[in-house]
Amino acid sequence: MLEKIIFRNHEGESLETAIDGIYYKYNDLRDYKWGYSSNGRQITGFNRGIVEKTVPLVILCNTEQEGIDIKNKLFMMAEKDVLANQPGRFSVGDYYLLGYVTGAKMTKYLYTKSYMEVSITFATSSEYWVKEHTYSFGLSEVTSNKNKRYAGRYPYRYANGLSETFLINEHYAECNFRMNIYGPCTKPSVYIGGYGYHFNIVLQEGEYLEIDSAAETVTKVMNFGIRANAFHYRNFENTVFRPIQTGRQSISWDGKFSFDIVLFEERSTPKWS
């Protein structure tokens, strides 16, 4: 069975191959190439920069009106991203790549309004395809978005007053993460693999703290979605942006607040499945 390709813009509108009257041909979405720098004698670093992907598509609908609607929707979705300067994404399996549809070459649209061949140009500055792994931790339950339970229903309670369980980074490399810590709580701390992520902040009911390791940002999200920079509330002795290491990582906290951790598995090409 062929993999599905999904194009989703920043507003969440989407088109899916084999579902919405769109079919794909061989393309270079999976292809990758690292650029590199050198001192003339040896390689000193790697980079990718901005890359353009080409995605040939066939629009084949049951009626002419369906064909018209799909063609207009594809253009509208792509144009919204460009005008808002907010990236959309192409998804292959569980992985997505952020970027923009910057062009389209259309052919064979004169036969019928229900058919067209179009070659999409997708520009991306992202070095990686990403798969997200979400884990939630609270007072009474530990879950993951893969419905795997890596610990008992209730976290363990130790003499030091900390609740403890663990997560597993199954990737071959360390992972960037996004952590949301939910109020009410005072000076929350989370230990991952024995490493402490500490914050000198007070969160009220309905507020949460968002930590993004890749962007190196700490944001307090208040009621009604108001966002405030909380970078200066982070611990200054140890960085709170340290990526999550590979393998089994113990998770410890005082059990007085709940939090989520999203691991971002990054690959040069989506994993075959």
Image (spheres, grey):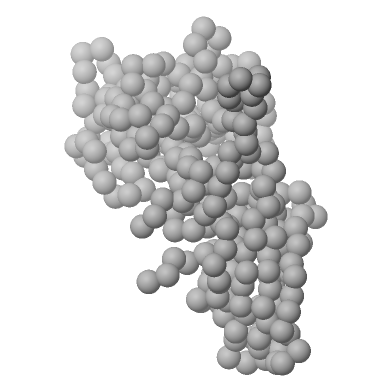
Nearer to us in this view, 183 or 75: 75
Horizontal and vertical percent position of residue 78? 71, 62
Q: Quadrant of the C terminus?
A: bottom left
Q: Quadrant of residue 90?
A: bottom right
Horizontal and vertical percent position of residue 39? 65, 19
Nearer to us in this view, 147 or 139: 147
Q: Quadrant of residue 37?
A: top right
Residue furthest to the front in view is 41
Horizontal and vertical percent position of residue 47? 62, 33
At a point 76% along the width and 62% down the height, the residue shown is 103
At a point 49% along the width and 32% down the height, the residue shown is 176
Residue 180 in sight: no
Residue 42 in sight: yes
Question: Considering only vertical position in the picture, is 186 above or below 12?
Answer: above
Q: Is 106 on the left-hand or right-hand side of 95? A: right
Q: Is 185 on the left-hand or right-hand side of 253? A: right
Residue furthest to the top in view is 237
Nearer to us in this view, 139 or 47: 47
Q: Is 165 on the left-hand or right-hand side of 124? A: left
Q: Quadrant of the N terminus?
A: bottom left
Residue furthest to the right in view is 83
At a point 68% along the width and 52% down the height, the residue shown is 52
Question: Considering only vertical position in the picture, is 253 above or below 72?
Answer: above
At a point 22% along the width and 23% down the height, the residue shown is 157
Q: Is 143 on the left-hand or right-hand side of 244? A: left
